[in-house]
Amino acid sequence: MTGTLPTEIGKMEYVGYNGDYTMLYSNSLTGQLPTEMGQMTALSRYLQWYQNSFTGTLPTQIGQMTQFTQSFLLYSNSIGGSLPTQLGQMTVMTQYFDLYSNAITGTLPPELANMGSSIDDLEYFRVYSNSISGTIPTEFGDANFGQYAQFYSNKITGSVPTELAKMPNNGWVAYLNFEYNTLCGDLPTEVTSISSSYAWYLGSQAGNGIGTECPPDPTPFPTISTLPTTLPTSSQPTLLPTTPVPSPLPTTEPTPLPTTEPTPVP
């Protein structure tokens, strides 16, 4: 199957059997994901559009799919842009949220910690093999991630927040993976004691710079507002003397010599 998804897809009140699924995976679909997909509020269990060639960004309107619970699969496409903060509105997710192997950029929004349910955690949250940057949000300590939370092979920087040690209190995070990013600083003692009991990949052995000093934040260039707006009040340099310029040479021409010829000698 080729082509793009029509905007009318948002008008589908019932998708699949009993509104449970839409499966378009392993095709050659292209183009951007229509914003109207956020109107598919009857879809509750399976959105499987992986292994296509979708581009563009992830629409913020997917945050309207607040009843979606199980398999949100858009991995192996070419979707770019940042992860929208509205993902945090999908609070009843329980199984799979997969956006790995795309072209996602930007930072990890703290609102991702709201995904999943306190009753039944989000078992798989996987955004590895993208170009996500920035630091690990401290709010992840309160996330309801379940067994697998995979962020490896991105461009995530900074130190590991101590708050991650609270994650097992919210869910059974057996596999937390930040391999092959550019983390730095010392691994907090609280996190070290937890990670030794689980398959947590955070340290220098995971292709990071844990144990090395984090580089300082670059000093920003001064903005226009920081530049002085008034001239200095020091005395101005003395101007050149204003003596008059000497009068020019006279312009009258000299009296010409007489033009009469002399009288010849007899």
Image: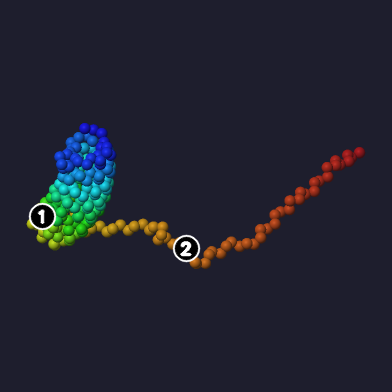
- Disc 2 is placed on an element classified as loop
Q: Dot 2, how many residues are within 10 Å of its Cα: few (below 14), some (14-19), or many (20+)?
A: few
Residue visible at 38% across and 58% down in the picture: 222
Q: Is residue 3 left or right of residue 144?
A: right
* Whether residue 212 can be seen here: no
Q: Is residue 43 left or right of residue 227?
A: left
Q: Which residue bears the numbered disc 2?
A: 230
Residue 43 position within the rendered picture, expressed as x and y whole percent measured from the top left: 19, 44
Residue bearing the label numbered 1: 172
Tell whether label 2 touches label 1 (CB within 8 Å).
no
Q: Residue furthest left?
A: 197
Tell which residue pokes out farthest to the top in this image.
1
- Given this view, does label 1 or label 2 mark the residue nearer the observer? 1
Dot 1 lies on which element? loop
Residue shown at 22%/53% (left/top)? 88
Q: Residue at point 21% right, 32% down?
A: 1
Q: Amino acid at mark 1?
A: Trp
Look at the picture and state if 98 lies above or below 30. Answer: below
At label 2, which amino acid type do we have? Thr
| Numbered label attached to residue 93 | none
